[in-house]
């Protein structure tokens, strides 16, 4: 599912018209798809009293179609209409149904809106879509401010944006000060780039994509897309009945130090929980007994130490002796940032020979690379780097604010510059390749903002690589499974108190949902 800017979306709509899929038909599809998504979000609509903010353009037209469906399904719908709609064929059925309607013009009083908001169970923002954003003032700003105040008084009042919250720029993500903080944005056809950029991303809430009937081939030339469940189900490795452990690959994980034993455990467990046939933990020798007691299913390669619990630079040569027997290598989780560790990582990756198998670099590996001059030119082959914003800032020698300003563009530029596959972690994780392709996850789960979840993700990716997936596919599918497992845990436990280890038993369930 592609991510489009305003010009691309308008071109798609024009192409649809040329194919016989008229603007009226697209609007009918959009309104129904939005209504169906709203019904899923709110549950029994017969128990809902929904205020719909209807604007003067196509976004408002989509809202009118949605209002008719929601009314017909049993919801009590009230309309707040900005601009004349008397000649609109989508408004006539609503008048026939005698749906509660307040028509506003520039000089009209809002009247009893505040009182009406007290009895509403949901608000739909269908004022403005991808058209030119102008500063809100006067009656529009008053209405949006009143909805915001109502939400502050009543936290259970959900706000659902149609296509995007009004005042959010579909390209840049900039917002009007009055733009609502939506709980959900049901975006039509394709996600818009501005929904995934700050500050717009904070106003969009959870993003849901509604299919409105646009043929896929019209956007084949777009190289940025979101990761979808059907795509992940299609690319995950098959598991034939006659398989043995060798059928599902061998992953080596160089990780852990005295202060970060758990990182090695979480990464290895992540790899195992996505079906890797064999996982070997290459850790400082002091840690072997502890980890063997935690994860009995792994094999071990004890590494020489520079001091207790800290890997020695000489361990790099030992690891290289075994790599030809493995299908992927993960380096970095919890290794620490001592001088000896930095030398170990530089020797392993840059001094002996190119790593001959697919490579994942996480946590302390990117941190070490950031301290090595010309590391990208010396690490000639493609590899997966999984930085969080702070690590990306160090690698690129810029501020975290610059990284976060446009995460999609940042990941694409870094991938092209360094000739590496980049997984820029965080809410709406971005995966980018050196050839300009990118995939974005729609997962945004505050429960995952805790120590160790990144180690689980890197283990997942290494495990999928070991099973034969390409770098781009393994990274994107791994990010999706990580997010899906997080959603399962959030559903069961909530966001507060979620721990990285909670994701591990949820990973096979996430896969089972995709491939029952």
Image (tube, rainbow, N blue to C red):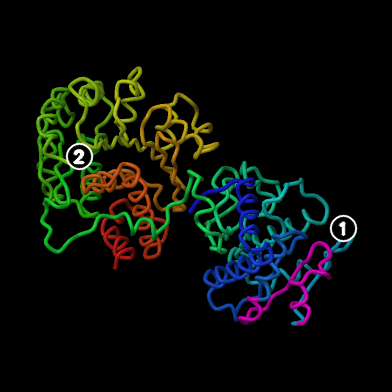
Segment tinted magenta in the rendering: 69-96
Furthest toward the right, the residue is: 107
Q: In the rendered image, which quarter is residue 328 located in?
A: top left
Q: Is residue 88 magenta?
A: yes
**Could you tell me residue 102's position as x and y percent?**
80, 70
Disc 1, SS: loop
In the rendered structure, are the residues bearing label 2 and label 1 in contact, judged by CB atoms less than 8 Å apart? Answer: no
User: In front: 504, or 96?
Assistant: 96
**Could you tell me residue 27's position as x and y percent?**
66, 65
Question: CA gap, disc 2 to disc 1?
Answer: 64 Å
Q: Residue at x 10, y 41 (%)?
A: 300
User: In front: 476, or 147?
Assistant: 476
Q: Residues within 10 Å of mark 2 (few under 14, many from 20)?
A: many
Q: Which residue is mark 1?
A: 106
Question: What numbered label is drawn on residue 253?
Answer: 2
Disc 2, SS: strand
In the drawing, does residue 96 fall left or right of residue 203? right
User: In front: 243, or 305?
Assistant: 243
Residue 382 against residue 498 in the figure, above or below: above
User: In front: 447, or 125?
Assistant: 125
**Could you tell me residue 60's position as x and y percent?**
72, 63
Q: Is residue 183 visible?
A: no
User: Which label's residue is closer to the chain start, 2 or 1?
Assistant: 1
Q: Residue at x 16, y 25 (%)?
A: 312
Q: Is residue 208 magenta?
A: no
**Could you tell me residue 41's position as x and y percent?**
53, 69
In the drawing, does residue 226 fall left or right of residue 95? left
Q: Quadrant of the C terminus?
A: bottom left
């Amino acid at each position: 599912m592609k991510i489009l800017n305003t010009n691309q979306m308008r071109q798609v709509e024009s192409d649809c018209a040329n194919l016989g899929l008229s603007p009226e038909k697209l609007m009918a599809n959009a309104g129904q798809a939005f209504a169906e998504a709203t019904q899923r979000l709110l549950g029994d609509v017969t128990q809902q009293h929904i205020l719909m903010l209807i604007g003067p353009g196509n976004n408002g037209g989509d809202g009118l179609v949605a209002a008719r469906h929601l009314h017909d399904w049993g919801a009590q719908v009230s309309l707040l209409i900005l601009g004349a709609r008397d000649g609109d064929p989508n408004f006539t059925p609503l008048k026939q149904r005698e749906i509660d309607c307040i028509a506003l013009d520039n000089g009209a009083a809002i009247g009893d809106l505040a009182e009406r908001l007290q009895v509403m169970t949901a608000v739909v923002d269908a004022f403005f879509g991808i058209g030119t954003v102008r500063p809100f003032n006067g009656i529009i700003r008053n209405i949006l401010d009143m909805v915001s105040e109502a939400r502050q008084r009543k936290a259970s009042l959900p706000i659902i944006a149609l296509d995007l919250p009004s005042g959010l720029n579909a390209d840049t993500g900039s917002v009007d000060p009055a733009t609502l903080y939506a709980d959900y944005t049901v975006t039509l056809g394709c996600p818009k780039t501005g929904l995934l950029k700050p500050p717009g991303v904070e106003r969009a809430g959870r993003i849901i994509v509604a299919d409105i009937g646009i043929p896929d081939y019209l956007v084949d030339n777009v190289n940025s897309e979101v990761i979808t469940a059907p795509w992940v189900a299609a690319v995950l490795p098959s598991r034939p009945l006659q398989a043995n452990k060798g059928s599902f690959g061998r992953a080596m994980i160089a990780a852990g130090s005295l202060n970060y034993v758990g990182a090695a455990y979480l990464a290895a467990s992540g790899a195992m929980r996505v079906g890797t046939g064999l996982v070997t933990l290459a850790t400082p020798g002091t840690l072997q007994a502890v980890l063997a007691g935690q994860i009995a299913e792994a094999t071990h390669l004890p590494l020489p130490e520079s001091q207790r619990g800290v890997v020695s630079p000489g361990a790099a040569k030992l690891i290289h002796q075994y790599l030809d027997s493995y299908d992927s290598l993960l380096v970095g989780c919890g290794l620490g940032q001592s001088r000896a560790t930095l030398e170990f990582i530089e020797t392993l990756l840059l001094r002996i020979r190119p790593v001959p198998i697919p490579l994942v670099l996480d946590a302390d590996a990117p941190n070490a690379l950031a301290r090595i001059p010309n590391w990208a030119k010396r690490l000639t082959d493609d590899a997966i780097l999984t930085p969080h914003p702070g690590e990306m800032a160090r690698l690129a020698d810029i501020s975290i604010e610059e990284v976060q300003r446009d995460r999609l563009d940042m990941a694409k530029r870094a991938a092209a510059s360094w000739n590496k596959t980049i997984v820029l972690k965080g809410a709406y994780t971005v995966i980018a390749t050196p050839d300009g392709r990118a995939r974005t996850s729609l997962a945004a789960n505050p429960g995952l903002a805790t120590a160790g979840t990144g180690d689980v993700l890197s283990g997942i990716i290494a495990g999928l690589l070991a099973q034969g997936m390409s770098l781009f596919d393994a990274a994107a599918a791994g990010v999706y499974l990580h997010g899906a497992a997080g959603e399962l845990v959030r559903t069961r436990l909530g966001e507060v108190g979620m721990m990285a280890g909670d994701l591990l038993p949820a990973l096979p369930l996430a896969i089972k949902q995709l491939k029952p």
